[in-house]
């Protein structure tokens, strides 16, 4: 399962263009995003550690972070997140382009083998032109890391980040083989980290939990996000009877939210501070004794609803034993953008309301 994090690419690119116009007098300069670096932490206020980089795709307003796969003797493994319920921060690395042009850089002389580094900073895909003794060769950069044409024996390679090129000429060159190309004049300029955010899937489940609880004032919530994530993990453990669940079926979200609400009711029964953060309908006021009774009775009613739901599925009321559970497709979550600002995606809607 990949974790999807949405990025407001239009706002971000506008900010980068404004920064580029201030940073240089060259009107042709464009500040481009090369890639995003993903940082992970088990808690919102914890220490965030870099886990992987994800290439920037201007045609997508999100990035997808793969799950961590440990390497073995046969596979190299995959860098990615350790737990899909963790918190994430992003940074982006930028570079200036369309500034520097190199003419007639030597690739080789008297040999068919070309294996060299053009420049120690990223180069731009596409405009590489090779010549033999000043005569343009039938050779092209395909903009996808490959070099082809009748002048080479087979596909060559070009690494745009490291600037290295490798290919074999079809015949011994008549003179010095040279290349013209553009390169980026500034590389590996990393931005500040974004605010902490959850992956879209978990963020929207937590939003559903808040709606069910009525805990929608995110400026003064009864339950912090980290607390609800912990309660979510406990609810999944109780419902599934196991750890390490990486995806929930649509049918499983309702009973899991019920379990979270039950847990929260017990907290609310005995914790006055949490209660005062919630707003009851019609400004209902409860004294301490009424509050304890109210939330304990509500927890009892939710427990009955939870067990009734399991029985309707044809399963046992034993939390760790479900049979006949109907199969559903995975939850379809609508997208949300929260790279700039770390709030959950429902904040603006609640504030508008």
Image: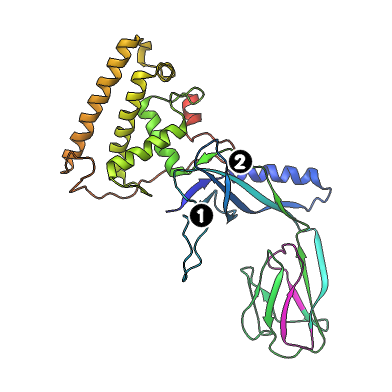
| 117 over 258 or under it: above or below | below
Q: Position of residue 78 (x, y in %)?
A: 50, 60
**Can residue 17 be seen in this snapshot?**
yes
Q: Quadrant of the N terminus?
A: bottom left
Q: Tell me, what colour scheme is on the image? A: rainbow
Marked residue nearer the N-terminal end (1 or 2): 1
Q: Badge 2 local density, few (<14 within 10 Å), some, or many (20+)?
A: some
Q: Position of residue 169 (x, y in %)?
A: 70, 85
Give the left or right position of residue 352, taking residue 109 as reference. Answer: left
Please tell me whether mark 1 sits on a helix, a strand or a loop: loop
Which numbered disc, 1 or 2, marks the residue closer to the eye?
1
Q: Residue at x 46, y 33 (%)?
A: 225
Report the side of 106 relative to 255 (left or right).
right
Q: Main secondary structure of the magenta part?
A: loop
Where residue 178 is drawn, which disc sits there?
Answer: none
Q: Which residues are magenta?
A: 109-130
* Residue located beneath label 1 in the image: 80
Q: Is 210 above or below relative to 235?
A: above
C-alpha separation, residue under disc 1 versus residue under disc 2:
18 Å
Q: Residue at x 35, y 46 (%)?
A: 331
Q: Tell me the tag on residue 194.
A: 2
């Amino acid at each position: 399962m990949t974790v999807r994090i949405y990025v407001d690419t239009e706002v971000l690119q506008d900010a980068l263009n404004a920064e580029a116009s201030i940073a240089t007098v060259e009107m042709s300069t464009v500040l481009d995003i090369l890639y995003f670096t993903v940082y992970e932490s088990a808690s919102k206020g914890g220490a965030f550690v870099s886990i992987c980089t994800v290439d920037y795709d201007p045609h997508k307003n999100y990035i997808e972070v793969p799950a961590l796969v440990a390497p073995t003797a046969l596979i190299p493994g995959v860098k990615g997140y350790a737990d899909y319920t963790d918190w994430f921060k992003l940074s982006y690395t930028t570079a200036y382009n369309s500034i520097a042009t190199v003419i007639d850089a030597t690739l080789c002389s008297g040999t068919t083998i070309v294996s060299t580094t053009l420049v120690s900073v990223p180069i731009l895909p596409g405009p590489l032109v090779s010549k033999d003794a000043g005569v343009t060769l039938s050779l092209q950069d395909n903009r996808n890391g490959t070099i082809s044409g009748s002048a080479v024996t087979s596909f060559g390679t070009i690494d745009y980040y490291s600037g290295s090129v490798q290919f074999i000429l079809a015949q011994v060159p008549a003179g010095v083989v040279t290349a013209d190309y553009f390169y980026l004049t500034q590389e590996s300029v990393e931005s500040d980290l974004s605010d902490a955010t959850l992956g879209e899937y978990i963020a929207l489940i937590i939003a559903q939990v808040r709606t069910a609880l009525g805990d929608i004032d995110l400026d003064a919530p009864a339950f912090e996000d980290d607390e609800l994530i912990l309660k979510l993990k406990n609810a999944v453990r109780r419902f599934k009877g196991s750890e390490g669940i990486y995806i929930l079926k649509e049918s499983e979200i309702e009973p899991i939210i019920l379990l979270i609400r039950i847990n929260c009711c017990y907290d609310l029964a005995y914790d006055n501070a949490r209660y005062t953060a919630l707003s009851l309908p019609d400004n209902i006021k409860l004294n301490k004794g009424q509050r304890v009774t109210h939330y304990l009775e509500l927890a009892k009613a939710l427990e009955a609803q939870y067990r009734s739901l399991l029985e309707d599925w044809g399963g046992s009321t034993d939390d760790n034993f479900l049979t006949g559970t109907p199969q559903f497709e995975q939850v379809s979550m609508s997208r949300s953008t929260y790279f700039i600002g770390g709030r959950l995606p429902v904040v603006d809607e609640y504030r508008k309301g």
